Every structure is written in C-alpha cells, then in structure tokens.
Amino acid sequence: MSERFKSLKEYVPGEQPRDRKYIKLNTNESPFPPPQSVIDAAARETECSNLYPDPTYKDLREALASAFEVEPSNIAVANGSDEILSFAFTAFCDSATGAVFPDITYGFYEVFSALHTIPHTCIPLREDFSILPEDYKNAKGTIFIANPNAPTGLALSSDKIESILSSNRQNVVVIDEAYVDFGAESSVPLIRKYPNLIVVGTFSKSRSLAGARLGYAVASNELIKDIDKIRYSNNPYNVSRATAAAGIAALSEQRYYEENIAAIKKTRALLLEKLSSLGFFCTDSMANFVFARHPMLSGEECYRLLKENGVLVRHFSSPRTDDYVRITVGSESEINKLSETLAQILRNKNNEG
Ligand code: PMP
C-alpha cells in the first residue's frame, strides 16, 4: 500500500450483522419498505442490465429538478450521498484551502479529508451542541455542515445557514441534508442566491432506499459541472439502471413518503417521552434518530447491554459523545421493545447498586 495511506483510519460503518436477528436501530434506515411502484420500476429496469445506464442520468436529473424546482443542470447524482460528499472533497478542497466542519458531526468528513490528503479544521460546537454561524465567518476552507447535524440531530434555521453563506462568499459551503425531511428547513431555495452553495441529499432515509444507494447534489451550474468532472473521472456509470429507475419512481410517491415521515415524527415523540421517563437526557432531534445519555450508564455500557439483549444502537467513542447513544426511530413496536429492554437494564443496574 502507498505510504500515503498506511496510517489512514477508514470509516467504520454501523454494524449490519447476519449472525442473529436484532432490533436494528443503529444506521438510521427507514422502518418502512419502498412503495410497490418503486420496487416494480427497479425490477423492470433490471431486465436491461446487459446495457450500461445513461451516464448523463438525464431522466433522473429531470425528475429531481422538477421536484426541487430547479434546472437539470443544477443536479448531479451519485451512488449514495457519501459518493457526492467524496466528489466534493476532491473537487473543492486542496492543501491550501482545506475542509472546515464541526468537531461533532458525520464521521465520514474526517475520513474523506484524510483520504484526499486535505487538511481540516474542526470548529467546536457550543456546550449545548449548537452551531454558532459566527464561528464560521470567513472560514479557512470548504465548509461541510450536516443539517440536521449527526449524531446530535440539532437543526440550523435557513437564516443561520444564510449567514454562514454570506460570510463565506470565497468558500464553497456544502450543506448535507441527509435528514432534512424529518424536521429541518431545506437550503435548496438558497442555491439561486448563493453560487457557492451545494446541497447534498439522499434517498437512503426518508425515501426508504438505503440499499439502492442514491444521492444527489443541488447547486449552481458551475459547481455541478465541477462535481460532474470528478464523477466522470471516477465512474461515469456510478448509479445503476435499477437504482436510477427506483429514484424516478420514488419522486412520484410523495404522499406515501409524507405519511411515513409523519409516522416517524410521531414515533420520535413517543421515543423521547419514554426515554425521558427512564431518566435519559435527549437532544432536541429533528432527525430520524435521537441522541441520548443516562446519568447511570456510559454510552458504551448502554450500547453493549442493549446489544446483549438483541437491540442494536450506535455509540461514538470520542470525548464529547462518549456518554451518549444514538438511537434510530424505528417502528412503534421496535421502540416499545427498546424501552422495555432499557427499563430492565436500569432495574438490574439499580439492584446491583
Ligand atoms: N450524511 C450524513 C449526515 C449521514 O448520516 C449519512 C448516512 N450515514 C450520509 C450522509 C450518507 O448516506 P448515503 O450514502 O446512504 O446517502
């Protein structure tokens, strides 16, 4: 292996275990399956799998453009939003102008910086995990902000995003909206006013297509051309035929997804209520997960004891996140099972004490 990468610490994805059946609340997938029309569209397109897809993804870009009320030239597509993020690190960061992101955020940003040998600056979140736009004024590099942020779930208003954009006209600003549909304001309308903005989105969460791998960017023509230059230089056929067809079909199932989003928000409220009655502190999440800590359990202990009892959640061991676990808002029955298991864990703990 090249010397450059010998010390690279790769991204560690959430567990996808095959050894036993878990209640899986660790990778923020939707508890709802894709609608039948999406499954059918993907199956039909699979029949043409002997042929490469259209590398311009014209139909998919047109469908996305009409959903976002922009032009197809404002859209790029990719194999999951991780791939768009990787393209953005390649296209917009170099060794002079590195990447800038909060100290607690999506762990892949740090990995992409290392992979693309780009320096990065972490800007600490405030004590309450909020992002203060002033901290980003005239930042020294390309800014990456997840809105809502992960794993805190906290959202920034459009006004605050706008103040970051207007004080960084010399920098590209990437807003990662993986979880936006669960309660945050989208920054897509700002692309007309800010040619330095890229909004990154995914079909993995609210649109129940994590396994299909489909992500996109919405931005000015110029930035999309740059992203596409990198895309063509990596893999021009980066989205499969079946996935592109699934994406187009998904865009005409708005009602189905809106109902699912409403159900997930309702279950999130139920989960927050149950966790708080068990003594957990939770952040005010606008995403399809909650971020919670308990005074009697470390994050690692909570993760481990839940896993022993067949429930998977996520724990991030860094100094500021160590006490917390991130729990995906699953189905109502999964959430009931999780809270029963937690109640039992806490009873055992009390008895030990
Ligand atoms: N951004 C954030 C903040 C995420 O949490 C994730 C999911 N792990 C992604 C992007 C990537 O999602 P995908 O590649 O499935 O679109």
Image: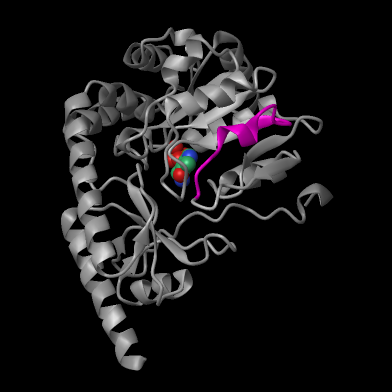
- Work out whether 285 lies above or below 20: above
224 or 57: nearer the eye?
A: 224
Residue located 37% across and 77% down the image: 305
Tell me, yes or no, whether the highlighted magenta stretch contains residue 130. yes
Quadrant of the image occupied by residue 256: top left
Range of the magenta residues?
129-142
Tell me, yes or no, whether the highlighted magenta stretch contains residue 50. no
Instruction: Classify residue 194 as left or right of residue 290.
Output: right
Image quadrant where one finds the C terminus: bottom left
- Work out whether 346 lies above or below 336: below
Residue located 37% across and 13% down the image: 59
Rendered location of residue 61, percent (x, y): 41, 15
Q: Is residue 237 visible?
A: no
**Predominant secondary structure, magenta span:** loop
Q: Is residue 114 visible?
A: yes
Quadrant of the image occupied by residue 46: top left
- Work out whether 36 lies above or below 224: below
